[in-house]
Image: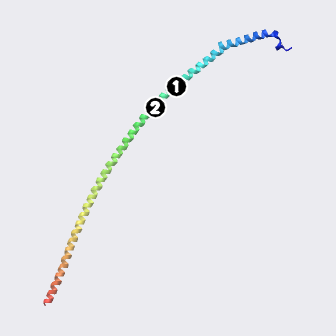
Amino acid sequence: MVPQLDTSFYISQIFWIVVCLLVLVIAFKKVFIPRMNKLVEKRSEYIKSLEKNIKDLEKQVDELSNKLQLVQDKKIIETNKIIEKAQYQCDVLLDQTNRELQTENEIAIKQSRKEADTIIRNLDKTLNEQIDNVAQELFDKMFQNKNGEDK
């Protein structure tokens, strides 16, 4: 007969199964579960500390971001001031150059007018002299013709 099927051994097998199960339950309850609980607690504490570090780092990042934004705003303002100053200097230089050019143009125009007036006066004199000469020649010719007819 097969020993597993012998009913005389059942009671001792049941006893040892119960004893083994009780030892395992007690070992789990007193040793393994508390150790696992400690590990879980340590892990949760570690995770909480990491979360706290993350929050601190996020605060630092926000502070740095705000500082960076302030620095950027200041630099933009400084840049705008530099640009405005450069524009003002350019405007001043343009106005000064404009005034100088206008003065030079006015001087050149005055000189050109003087030269034109001189040329016109010279032309008037020359024309008047030529008109006088032509008139004199006409007058002479007219009188020569009358004198020649009279004679």
Give the x, y percent position of residue 97.
Answer: 31, 53
Left or right for 90, reference 49: left
The residues bearing labels 2 and 1 have C-alpha atoms spaced at a distance of 16 Å
Q: Which residue is located at x 24 percent, y 63 percent?
A: 113
Identify the secondary structure beneath mark 1.
helix
Quadrant showing the C terminus: bottom left
Relative to the observer, which residue lies in front, 61 or 86?
A: 61
- 144 vs 45: above or below: below
Q: Which mark is residue 64?
A: 2
Q: Which residue is located at x 39 percent, y 41 percent?
A: 79
Residue type, label 1: Asn
- 8 vs 72: above or below: above
Crowd around label 1: few <14 · some 14–19 · many ≥20 (10 Å)? few
Q: How many marks?
A: 2
Left or right for 73, reference 38: left
Left or right for 42, reference 13: left
Give the x, y percent position of residue 90.
Answer: 34, 48
- Quadrant for residue 149, please give it: bottom left
Left or right for 5, reference 47: right
Residue picked out by circle 1:
53
Give the x, y percent position of residue 22.
Answer: 70, 11
